[in-house]
Image (spheres, rainbow, N blue to C red):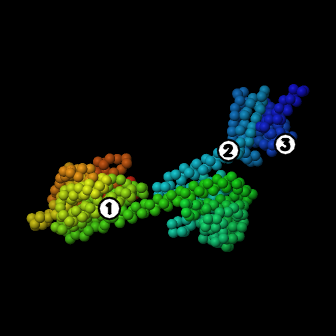
């Protein structure tokens, strides 16, 4: 008897719950810790079937493990969630005990909730991680977040973003209850227009978050659709949290809770951390957009429109790279020399940043000055540019192609034009003859980049062009792809040019970019095209 009493005292002293179940699955013992964890008096459990006392076990992981231990006689451990009325996570050690089993269990809800909150923050961060490349990507990522936040942090959620023009827009929403998702969607479509200045959402847009009874928010709305929809959502409490950037509020996270549920302080802390991450992602997108616009404006300010010439039609195009950081040193130029010869230039400074764009401006201006002062041909112009770069210690490298269109008196009488071409490591020109055939690429020679050796010997290629001929100079962004080489890109260009040979010059340029780039390019694209008139 004393031995039995000692065993009972030991079991009762355990800090973990203990439940004994016999071979017929009836509960034979419940210690005090189990009573406290389960919230049930032992008198109501003793003699009751385990499956009747906790019917969810008949179809969950706990029940599967209990049966496995009873069948094999081997101890096992299981950790899982038991739904209402317990609404708890348990870790259970299941030990065979004669014909039955013994259950030793602890409530691990706090640990599991903490893990889930950390996992939620990780998922939010992962969703936002790729949104820096473009501002549109950030809003798309933000619009998906309510499906991650519900029901972990609330029963329903709406995310609001402030656009550059100061206009707020609800970009994402979700409800844990599928039946009420349409209500939330309809409410999100009309709520901002109906909200007075003192509403929680408007106050959060101004930087003041709050936790509030949703009934008060309903009372603030004027009679109408928004008020009716919010009333139908059967919401008890809500919270609004500003999405803060570095120096401004960029939106609002609205979390709402069904009537009878109140936000825990730990959940509000996680919600604020989520809001901080969203705000930072939106701010990064805003800053990258501004950087891209600034770089594009800088580069475009250094490039001029096409020069007008009585004997030729000229078109120019510049398309910046999709990534803001890759905007850099591509340039084109077209001008008339003192002799009346028309000169076209294409170039690309090594590098993809604003420093490359600045160097491009210097080289472009130097080349233009040398060519318009000296009236020299392509070889002498590039030789002079290389010498100037060395004299001025510019410390940069660049490719360049120069084409000079000129006529002797005899050429003018025959109606033909000579094109002199030289290249400092640049891609060859594309020449489309009036009959739609292309000049063979073997006629063009590429030589040393600018900035390597100012004494390098350079040569020219000369081709005679009939009226109606078209010449296209371009940078490698038009044809180069990460998953292909330049030869493949050149083949695509020549194939497209053959198909488009009869198009107008503007259409030819636009169609080539559309077909070869297919949206925003991986690298800048600059091109200048000329069509000789009859």
Residue 229: x percent and y percent? 66, 66
- The residue nearer to you, when weighing 440 against 340, is 340
Residue 330: x percent and y percent? 32, 58
**Looking at the rendered structure, which numbered label has been put on residue 112?**
2
Q: Of marks 3 and 2, which one's residue comes earlier in the chain?
A: 3
Image quadrant holding the N terminus, namely top right
Q: How much space separates mark 3 and mark 2, taking CA atoms? A: 26 Å
**Residue for badge 3:** 41
Mark 3 or 2: the one toward you: 2
In this rendering, would 247 be left or right of 221?
A: left
**Looking at the rendered structure, which numbered label has been put on residue 170?**
none
Q: SS class of the residue under badge 2?
A: helix
Above or below 81: residue 437: below
Q: Of marks 3 and 1, which one's residue comes earlier in the chain?
A: 3
**Residue for badge 1:** 361
In this rendering, would 518 be left or right of 107?
A: left
Q: Report the residue at 78% width, 30% height from top.
A: 100
Image quadrant holding the C terminus, namely bottom left
- The residue nearer to you, when weighing 511 against 340, is 340
């Amino acid at each position: 008897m004393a031995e039995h009493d000692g065993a009972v005292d030991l079991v009762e002293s355990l800090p973990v719950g203990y439940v004994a179940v016999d071979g017929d699955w009836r509960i034979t013992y419940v210690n005090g810790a189990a009573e406290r964890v389960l919230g049930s008096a032992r008198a109501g459990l003793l003699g009751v079937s385990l499956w009747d006392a906790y019917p969810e076990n008949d179809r969950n992981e706990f029940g599967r493990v209990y049966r496995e231990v009873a069948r094999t006689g081997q101890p096992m451990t299981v950790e899982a969630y038991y739904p209402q009325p317990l609404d708890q996570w348990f870790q259970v050690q299941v030990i065979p005990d004669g014909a039955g089993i013994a259950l030793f269990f602890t409530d691990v809800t706090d640990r599991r909730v903490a893990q889930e909150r950390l996992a939620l923050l990780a998922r939010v961060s992962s969703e936002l991680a790729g949104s820096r490349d473009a501002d549109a990507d950030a809003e798309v990522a933000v619009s998906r977040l309510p499906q991650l936040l519900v029901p972990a942090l609330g029963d329903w959620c709406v995310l609001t973003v402030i656009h550059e023009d100061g206009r707020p827009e609800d970009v994402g929403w979700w409800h844990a209850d599928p039946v009420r998702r349409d209500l939330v969607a309809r409410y999100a479509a009309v709520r901002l227009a109906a909200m007075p200045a003192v509403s929680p959402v408007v106050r959060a847009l101004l930087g003041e978050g709050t936790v509030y009874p949703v009934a008060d928010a309903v009372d603030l709305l004027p009679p109408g659709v928004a008020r009716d929809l919010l009333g139908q959502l059967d919401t008890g409490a809500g919270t609004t949290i500003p999405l803060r950037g570095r120096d401004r509020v960029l939106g609002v996270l609205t979390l709402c809770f069904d009537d009878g549920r109140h936000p825990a302080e730990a959940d509000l802390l996680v919600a604020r951390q989520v809001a901080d991450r969203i705000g930072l992602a939106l701010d990064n997108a805003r800053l990258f957009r501004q950087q891209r616009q600034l770089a594009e404006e800088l580069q475009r300010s250094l490039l001029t429109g096409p020069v007008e010439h009585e004997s030729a039609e000229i078109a120019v195009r510049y398309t910046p790279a999709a990534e803001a950081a890759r905007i850099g040193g591509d340039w084109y130029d077209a001008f008339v020399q003192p002799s009346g010869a028309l000169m076209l230039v294409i170039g690309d400074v090594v590098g993809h940043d604003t420093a490359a764009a600045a160097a491009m401006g210097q080289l472009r201006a130097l080349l233009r000055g040398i060519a318009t002062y000296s009236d020299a041909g392509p070889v002498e112009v590039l030789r002079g540019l290389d010498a100037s770069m060395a004299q001025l210690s510019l410390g940069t490298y660049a490719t360049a192609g120069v084409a000079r269109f000129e006529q002797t008196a005899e050429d003018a009488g025959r109606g033909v034009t000579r094109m002199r071409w030289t290249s400092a490591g640049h891609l060859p020109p594309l020449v489309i003859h009036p009959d739609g055939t292309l000049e063979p690429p073997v006629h063009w020679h590429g030589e040393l980049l600018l900035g390597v050796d100012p004494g390098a010997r350079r040569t020219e290629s000369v081709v005679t062009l009939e009226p109606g001929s078209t010449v296209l100079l371009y940078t490698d962004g038009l044809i180069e792809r990460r998953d292909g080489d330049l030869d493949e890109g050149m083949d695509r260009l020549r194939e497209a040019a053959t198909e488009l040979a009869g198009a107008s010059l503007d259409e030819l340029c636009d169609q080539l970019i559309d077909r070869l780039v297919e949206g925003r390019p991986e690298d800048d694209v600059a091109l200048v095209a000329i069509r000789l008139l009859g």
